[in-house]
Image (cartoon, rainbow, N blue to C red):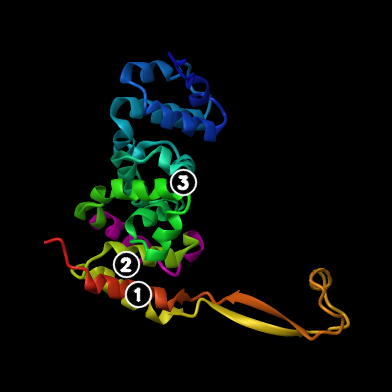
């Protein structure tokens, strides 16, 4: 008989990554065994308070209970960190409760939290191209991901799509003032293109209103270099590659323009206009 894991040490410990791994393992225990793993000691700080509270919620009602109590959990910092860790090991967490948690995190009033749910949700909501699916099938992890996507498909319900749409509208309504907080505004636009329908007039108005802020997201600048006085590290790279001295060379820099990606914006609008409403 395999030994029962000692999760209590990590649930009440200072290593947050190990604590989240313990939370994932806690979900696989029967309720009595899981409850016995929750530390009985008083939490010493906000981090441990958060870990132990999440553990209690998981034992009482699964990850769905964590989603229901999401905004009551202490500090945006630890809510953000939990979503980051779940994203890093999502295949260990895959169930409908976790998907509900991600949608709830996207609705979080703190953008630092909501932007962390963005990537994982996109990975399950956005359709894969034939090439992306083919590439995923080449690796063991990719095959597990495809299986997880198939499992998650029924969880992407019309009500959840509507909630994601409203959360994304609320976030993008603050653009461009909130750009520094978003980090990846184009990804918010892309996800909205995968959740909204042609009946979501507010989403369409919002995206159409972003056109003046869109264009080429990057521009290239080319600078000719003195072939007899190449800067570092170009000189080292040229020597390693065996490029003869005196060969004309140039430096090409890709510089962000600060504009939204116009093609991404137009693709999102087109997808929304093509998607029928749920009723």
Measured Cα–Cα span from mark 1 to mark 3: 31 Å
Residue at image mark 3: 140
Which residue in the structure is indicated by mark 1?
Answer: 267
Report how far apart the C-alphas of labels 3 and 2 lie in the structure: 30 Å
User: Which x, y percent locates residue 43?
Assistant: 49, 23
Based on the picture, tell me whether residue 173 belongs to the magenta stretch.
Answer: yes
Which residue is tagged 2? Answer: 193
Q: Identify the secondary structure beneath mark 3.
A: helix
Q: Are marks 2 and 1 in contact (CB under 8 Å)?
A: yes
How far apart, in angstroms, are the residues tagged by discs 2 and 1? 8 Å
- Tell me if mark 3 has few (under 14), some (14-19) or many (20+) residues whose alpha carbon lies within 10 angstroms of its own: few
In the image, which residues are magenta?
Answer: 162-181
Residue 108 visible in the displayed image: no
Residue occupying image coordinates x 32% and y 64%? 192
Is residue 240 in view? yes
**Looking at the image, is mark 3 or mark 2 earlier in the sequence?**
3
**Image location of residue 54, percent across then percent down:** 39, 31
């Amino acid at each position: 008989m395999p030994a029962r894991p000692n999760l209590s040490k990590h649930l009440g410990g200072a290593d947050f990554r190990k604590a989240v791994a313990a939370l994932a393992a806690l979900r696989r225990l029967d309720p009595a065994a899981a409850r016995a793993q929750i530390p009985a000691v008083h939490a010493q700080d906000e981090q441990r308070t958060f870990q132990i509270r999440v553990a209690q919620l998981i034992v009482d009602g699964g990850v769905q209970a964590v989603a229901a109590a999401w905004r009551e959990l202490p500090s945006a910092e630890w809510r953000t960190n939990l979503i980051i860790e779940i994203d890093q090991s999502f295949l260990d967490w895959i169930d409908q409760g976790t998907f509900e948690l991600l949608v709830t995190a996207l609705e979080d009033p703190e953008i630092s939290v909501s932007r962390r749910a963005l990537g994982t949700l996109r990975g399950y909501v956005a359709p894969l191209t034939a090439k992306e699916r083919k590439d995923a099938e080449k690796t063991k992890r990719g095959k597990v991901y495809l299986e997880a996507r198939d499992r998650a498909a029924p969880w992407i319900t019309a009500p959840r799509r509507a909630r994601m749409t409203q959360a994304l509208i609320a976030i993008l309504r603050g653009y461009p003032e909130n750009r520094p907080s978003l980090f990846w505004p184009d990804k918010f636009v892309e996800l909205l293109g995968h959740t909204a329908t042609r009946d979501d007039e507010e989403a369409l108005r919002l995206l159409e209103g972003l056109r003046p802020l869109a264009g080429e997201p990057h521009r290239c600048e080319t600078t000719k270099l003195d072939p007899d006085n190449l800067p570092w590290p170009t000189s080292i790279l040229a020597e390693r590659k065996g490029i003869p001295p005196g060969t004309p060379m140039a430096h090409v820099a890709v510089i962000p323009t600060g504009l939204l990606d116009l093609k991404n914006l137009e693709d999102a609008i087109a997808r929304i206009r093509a998607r029928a409403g749920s009723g």
